[in-house]
């Protein structure tokens, strides 16, 4: 599980990590929450960045953009989902990184099909 975003206090950041670890089925937690204050401007910027990345993924015919969830926090984009190959995972990360306003990319895409 990957936690990203902004919380008000260090205690809230730690508690979110603990809750994530206690969630059924979670085998690992990366806590990249930051402590600080979100402004309306930064929230709008993150929505715009996420939208721009999603549009670029949709425009790339090699990538099934519907399989990828895109979020952004303070300019850092997180890609979550499942893709068919390492090549497509790398390409999605490259597309996100090349998008104006992106300061970093956390590529959490899994490769391969779901096994039931």
Image (cartoon, rainbow, N blue to C red):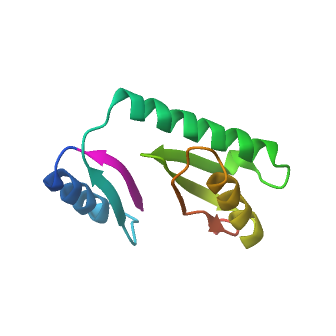
Query: In the image, is residue 1 above or below residue 101?
Result: below
Image coords of residue 79 (percent x, y): 57, 55
Residue 6 on the magenta span? yes
Nearer to us in this view, 28 or 60: 60
User: 9 or 30, which lies in front?
Assistant: 9
Out of 79 and 26, give the one closest to the viewer.
Answer: 79
35 displayed left or right of 91: left
SS majority, magenta: strand
Residue 93 on the magenta segment = no
- With respect to residue 39, does 18 lie above or below? below
Which quadrant is the N terminus positioned in?
bottom left
Residue furthest out toward the left: 11
Which residue is at 58% across, 48% downward?
Answer: 69
**Residue 63, image x and y in percent?**
78, 53
Which residue occupies 76% across, 51% down?
Answer: 64
Q: How many marks?
A: 0
- Specify the segment rendered in magenta: 1-7
Image spot of residue 116 (x, y percent)? 62, 66
Direction from residue 10 to residue 71 in the image, left or right: right
In the displayed orientation, state which residue is furthest to the right.
Answer: 61
**Rendered location of residue 45, percent (x, y):** 48, 34
* Residue beneath the point at 20% across and 43% down: 8
When the figure is inspected, residue 80 is found, relative to residue 115, above or below; the finding is above
- x 27%, y 61%: residue: 17
Q: Quadrant of residue 115?
A: bottom right
């Amino acid at each position: 599980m990957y936690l990203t975003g902004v919380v008000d206090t260090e205690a809230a950041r730690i508690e979110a990590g603990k809750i994530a670890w206690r969630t059924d089925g979670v085998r690992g937690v990366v806590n990249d929450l930051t402590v600080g204050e979100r402004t309306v401007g930064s929230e709008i910027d993150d929505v715009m960045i996420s939208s721009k990345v999603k549009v670029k993924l949709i425009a790339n015919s090699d990538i099934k953009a519907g399989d990828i969830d895109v979020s952004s926090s303070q300019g850092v984009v997180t890609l979550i989902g499942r893709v068919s190959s390492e090549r497509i995972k790398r390409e999605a990360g490259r597309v996100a990184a090349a998008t104006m306003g992106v300061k970093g990319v956390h590529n959490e895409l899994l490769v391969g099909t779901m096994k039931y």
